[in-house]
Amino acid sequence: MTSKTPPTLSARDRLIVALDVPDTATAERLAGSLTGHVGVFKIGLELAMSGGIDLARDLAADGHNVFLDLKLLDISNTVTKAVENAANQGFAFLTVHAYPAAMRAAVAGLGDSKLCLLGVTVLTSLNTADLAEAGYVDAPEALVLNRAQSAAATGMGGIVCSPNEVTAVRSKAGASLTIVTPGVRPAGSDSGDQKRVATPASAIKAGADYLVVGRPITQSRDPKTAAAEIVTEIATAL
Ligand code: C5P
């Protein structure tokens, strides 16, 4: 079995840009300059707190692919109702932390929506020491695999993991899952707070369907060129 992700996705379709900026005016400018150069606009917690959810609706209504990265985790009733409300607003992706109960609740809220629910396995900013500090005994890869298997079993559309775990997820859990990887850094760029990172080419060669890139594009002096270079690297690796 292969991934549910359409095999016809172009290199550009596979690039998700994280619009992690302080306000919607900045986000709209950035989205305007990147339209046609990336496949998906991702709106996460920073922008959600300053009008980003309305912007997400506007971008979706204008025909853009929109990824709402709200990383839901709450009691089952709340998660189901949140997904019911998000399900028919035209978003392409929505994230839920990959806890089995939360994922089951999210899937229950989907109805016949085409929204792709993604289970966030282990944040790419966490390493083994961070997991130990939080009380986990597993290293990231083992926990990612466990959560990816739960995501597949609960009927999620896909998962989010680091490029380093994609090969293992594909072979042991994720044949049918869409795999999205943040923690992507072009060679020579700053990792910031990301700890489990790889280049766009290695993420694609490992089998990732979509790559999330934020700061290497949004903090570049020339975001359009930064995105174009990543798309070229993806195309070469495909
Ligand atoms: O700037 P950078 O490329 O590190 O941005 C990565 C984006 O992906 C951020 O918006 C972050 O919230 C998101 N993300 C992540 N790790 C996950 C899930 C989402 O970095 N596991």
Image (cartoon, grey):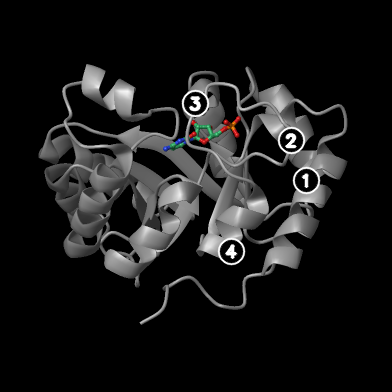
Q: Quickly name the residue at label 4.
A: 205
Q: Nearer the viewer, mark 4 or mark 3?
A: 4
Residue 48, numbered label: 3
Mark 3 residue element: helix
Quick one: label 4 or label 2, which is nearer the N terminus?
A: 4
| Residue drawn 62% across the image and 71% down it | 9
* Gap between marks 1 and 3 measured at Cα: 23 Å
> Ligand 1 near label 3 (Cβ, under 8 Å)?
no
Examine the rendered structure and indicate whether residue 86 appears above or below residue 155. above
Q: Is label 3 in contact with label 2 (beta carbons under 8 Å)?
A: no
| Residue drawn 17% across the image and 63% down it | 153
Q: Quickly name the residue at label 2.
A: 217
Examine the rendered structure and indicate whether residue 137 appears above or below residue 203. above
Amino acid type at circle 3 is Ala
* Gap between marks 4 and 3 measured at Cα: 32 Å
Amino acid type at circle 4 is Lys
* Gap between marks 3 and 2 measured at Cα: 19 Å
Quick one: label 1 or label 3, which is nearer the N terminus?
A: 3
